[in-house]
């Protein structure tokens, strides 16, 4: 006869359903969470748009890599947009609506038809890890009796700054209505003294407090009260004070980041042959690594504005002149769809292309983590997307921040004022300012930035290592998900 514990061991493991928004910055960390769950021998179903699945198959080995884990499966659904739709810039907003109007109804139908994905080999879904922006998730989970864990791909500071919307409004710190952008914000505990109006998440930059996008992001943050827990890609060493404030209101917060480092560490610890799984939606141009190999140590500025940012041709030229005048070498990721207002002209005039030769390299998409960890890279000109920020912190690379939208405005303030590992040039786009910021980070104040960045990199590496807080929080999360299985 088998004992109760033996019987439990024979039963299939927990089955976690993961549903990210179909954009690069959400797909990356949530696919890594899926990998971590596979390492814990859980069953995982990962919802991905047909469009992104095709791109993953085309540009990565993700599918083959996950085939090592028999408990893992992708479920593809349409995102409702034609293939040639620009899913960046404002197109990203259309993508959000299309997911709500097309993908979500199909998802719900599929879940009913498939009996919550139960089969002979796997339980029906025992826990739903949903992107925090998917507002249908709480109702869906309540109707189907599934515990909900929200995944928020942005930092705690962003969550907290949006959560304090009612207090900001009451203190008349929003709407901005011509008030000084440099005025200090007082109604967000933990950020008094350094957070200015201009550093609030970009969604606050509206004249009308009833702006639908702002209302949407506030509502999404408040959904947390209908979830059992929240996962954050951050750590106590980066945002300890903010996490403490947040936890007074949100009881079960699992800060497990930087997730990309947590995966690396767990793989190393397990001594598995499985490798890091990348989720690039564009073809990585690996020739840039050969180019970096030929550059002196810490001599190159890596320039990337992520997967969604759009630049006007004028802005491209300001950055380019700033970079060229700084005299530092650079590697610039310029996505083919990222420059607007060219009116059919090449974004970069021929005479400037001549000046770039030998000094700089332009690519359409890079293996970013590899680039940031390359010895030739000494600085990162970034839009301050949270994944890029974490990757730069973990690699110990100082930043020049030029935030674009959403959480980026607050992330860049933390880089310059809290961790002091770079400069924030938000709300300007001037070649002289860009040149000076690059010179500051790459030469004038190089040593202090390098020292602080190196120290912070050590701290975050420690946090995901055995005994560190993010390491322990991941173990706690695994136990918590196990406890949800009836
Ligand atoms: N990325 C990449 N290659 C590039 C540019 C970006 O692999 O050439 C990755 C980067 O490593 C990061 C993600 O794309 O993981 C961008 O996410 P982030 O949150 O920084 O910005 P977003 O694209 O969401 O604005």
Image (cartoon, rainbow, N blue to C red):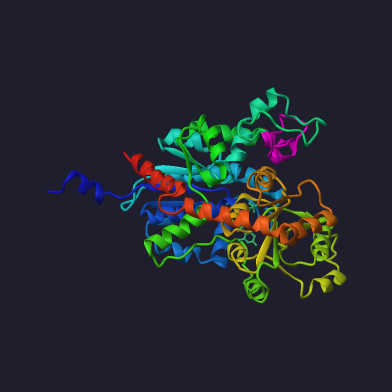
Residue lying at the far left of the rendered structure:
1
- In front: 239, or 160? 239
Residue 468 lies, with reference to residue 193, above or below; the image says below
- In front: 115, or 439? 439
Residue 303 within the segment the image draws in magenta: no
Q: Is residue 299 visible?
A: yes
- In front: 118, or 378? 378
Residue 204 lies, with reference to residue 32, above or below; the image says above
Span highlighted in magenta in the image: 193-214
> Where is residue 222 drawn, in percent x and y?
57, 32
Count of numbered circles on the image:
0
> Where is residue 158 drawn, in percent x and y?
62, 40
User: Going 54% across and 40% down the picture, which residue do you hit?
Assistant: 240
Residue 324 lies, with reference to residue 33, above or below; the image says below
User: Going 55% across and 41% down the picture, which residue do you hit?
Assistant: 132
Q: Is residue 112 visible?
A: no
Residue 212 within the segment the image draws in magenta: yes
Q: Is 115 displayed left or right of 461 in the figure?
A: left
> Where is residue 402 drawn, in percent x and y?
73, 51
- In front: 72, or 150? 150
> Where is residue 128 drawn, in percent x and y?
45, 43
Determine which quarter of the picture holds residue 55. bottom right
Q: Answer with the quadrant where ligand 1 appears in the image.
A: bottom right
């Amino acid at each position: 006869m088998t004992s109760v514990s033996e019987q439990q061991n024979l039963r299939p493991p927990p089955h976690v359903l993961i549903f990210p928004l179909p954009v690069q910055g959400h797909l990356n960390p949530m696919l890594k969470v899926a990998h971590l769950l596979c390492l814990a021998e859980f069953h995982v179903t990962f919802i991905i748009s047909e469009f992104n699945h095709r791109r993953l198959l085309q540009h990565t080995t993700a599918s083959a890599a996950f085939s090592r884990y028999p408990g893992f499966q992708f479920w593809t659904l349409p995102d409702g947009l034609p293939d040639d739709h620009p899913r960046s810039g404002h197109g990203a907003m259309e993508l959000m609506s299309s997911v709500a109007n097309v993908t979500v109804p199909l998802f719900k139908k599929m879940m009913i038809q498939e009996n919550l994905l139960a089969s002979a080999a796997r339980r029906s879904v025992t826990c739903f890890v949903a992107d925090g922006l998917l507002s249908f998730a709480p109702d869906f989970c309540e109707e189907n009796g599934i515990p909900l864990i929200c995944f928020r791909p942005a930092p705690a500071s962003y969550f907290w700054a949006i959560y304090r919307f009612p207090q900001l409004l009451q203190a008349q710190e929003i709407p901005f209505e011509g008030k000084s952008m440099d005025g200090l914000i007082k109604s967000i505990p933990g950020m008094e003294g350094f957070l200015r109006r201009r550093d609030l998440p970009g969604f606050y930059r509206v004249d009308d407090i009833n702006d639908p996008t702002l209302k949407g992001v506030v509502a999404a943050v408040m959904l947390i009260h209908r979830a059992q827990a929240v996962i954050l890609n951050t750590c106590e060493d980066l945002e300890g004070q903010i996490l403490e404030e947040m936890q007074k209101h949100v009881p079960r917060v699992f800060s497990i980041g930087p997730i990309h480092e947590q995966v690396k560490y767990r793989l190393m610890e397990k001594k598995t042959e499985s490798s890091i799984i990348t989720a690039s939606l564009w073809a990585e141009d690996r020739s840039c690594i050969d180019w970096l190999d030929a550059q002196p140590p810490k001599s190159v500025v890596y320039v990337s504005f992520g997967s969604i940012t759009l630049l006007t041709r004028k802005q491209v030229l300001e950055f380019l002149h700033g970079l060229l005048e700084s005299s530092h070498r650079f590697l610039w990721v310029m996505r083919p769809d990222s420059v607007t207002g060219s009116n059919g002209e090449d974004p970069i005039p021929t005479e400037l292309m001549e000046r770039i030769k030998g000094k700089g390299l332009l690519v359409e998409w890079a293996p970013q983590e590899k680039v940031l960890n390359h010895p030739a890279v000494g600085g990162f000109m970034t839009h301050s997307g949270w994944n890029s920020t974490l990757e730069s912190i973990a690699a110990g690379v100082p930043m020049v921040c030029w935030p674009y939208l959403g959480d980026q405005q607050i992330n860049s303030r933390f880089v310059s004022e809290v961790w002091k590992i770079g400069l924030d040039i938000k709300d300007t786009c001037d070649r002289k300012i860009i040149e000076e910021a690059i010179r500051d980070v790459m030469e004038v104040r190089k040593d202090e930035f390098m020292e602080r960045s190196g120290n912070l990199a050590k701290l975050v590496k420690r946090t995901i290592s055995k005994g560190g807080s993010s390491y322990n929080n991941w173990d706690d999360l695994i136990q918590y998900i196990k406890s949800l299985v009836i």
